[in-house]
Amino acid sequence: MASVRKDDVWDSMRKGAQELVEKEPLLGGFVYSKILNQPTFERSLAFMLATKLASSTVLASQWNDLIIDALTSTAEEEKSMGGRGSPAPGTGSIADAARADLRAILSRDPACPSYTHAFLFFKGFQGLQAQRVSHWLWSKGRTVIACFVQSSISEVFGMDLHPGAKFGRGILVDHATGIVVGETAVVDDDCTLFHGVTLGGTGKVSGDRHPKLQKRVVVGAHAAVIGNISIGHDSKIGASASILHDLPPNSVVVGHKGIVIQKRGHKGKHSLLSKL
């Protein structure tokens, strides 16, 4: 008999959803439709994204079918990997990446009281999961519908995330408004992006032209990281900084001129509030 996989995130979400309904009965229909009436985390995620992206021309039921297809396909892809370490950014199970993102939000964002709260109310989380679906479409050669999803994400969430961009797991997109991430950007595991961040190109080259963020990089509000450059792991980029060159691991950079105040430092616990 096959063992049943324990899903701690889903169990916690359902418990939190029930408590939310008891506190705010007015939200009962909203919470039941998104979480309590759904059989699994995957179905809940698909329904939530489908209702966010739905319009008069593409119905929620149509989005739901497409998103379920993406979740199923990427889960099978990760299973075929045989559990050999963490998947590369932009690959593997979308649902497992979403779980990791929720864990990251609860761990690193002091404004988040629960998985349920982040799932229902944080547009940074929601927009990123929609991008993961668009990236799956992009990787399958379905570039037109992928770009349609990108456009919908921009309209609904105020985030411009190209479907070609690759995101790892445990990503915190805080506040989210005005974030721009270009086609060939890579954001590795456990990174944090604040509102207004741009991971863009110089406009002078084509092809591989966007930044590559290694693990646990924090990019402050309205910072711009431009060009095909590498930002070393555990680096922190302050608000409104402009970065046009590679940074070694553990760098700390501040100011609109991108002044490096630390190149090699203590590898402390990753925190959203680690004194940018």
Image (tube, rainbow, N blue to C red):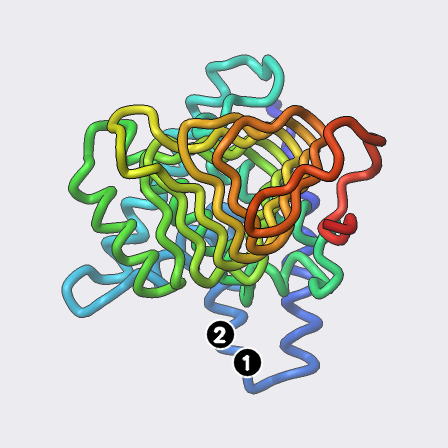
Residue that numbered label 1 is attached to: 27
Asked where in the image residue 4 lies, by quadrant, the reply is top right
**Left or right: residue 93 compared with residue 100:** left
Q: Give the residue type at disc 2.
A: Phe
Going by the image, does 107 lie left or right of 125? right
Q: Is residue 176 above or below residue 9?
A: below
Judge by depth and name the residue closer to the eye, 197 or 20.
Answer: 197
Indicate left or right for 234 with 91 as reference. right
SS at badge 1: helix
Q: Position of residue 33 (x, y in %)?
A: 46, 67
Q: CA distance from mark 2 to mark 1?
A: 5 Å
Taking 87 as reference, is 158 above or below it? below
Residue at the spot 60% in from the left edge and 22% down from the top edge: 86
Q: Residues within 10 Å of mark 1 (few under 14, many from 20)?
A: few
For label 2, the crowd category at 10 Å Cα-Cα, with few meaning under 14, some 14 to 19 and many 20 or more, is few
Tell me where residue 179 appears, x and y as whole percent: 44, 54
Q: Residue at x 60, y 60 (%)?
A: 118
Q: The disc labelled 1 sits on which kind of residue?
A: Leu
Residue at image coords 77%, 26%: 264
Residue 40 in sight in this render: no
- Where does label 2 land, which residue? 30
Q: Quadrant of residue 233?
A: top right
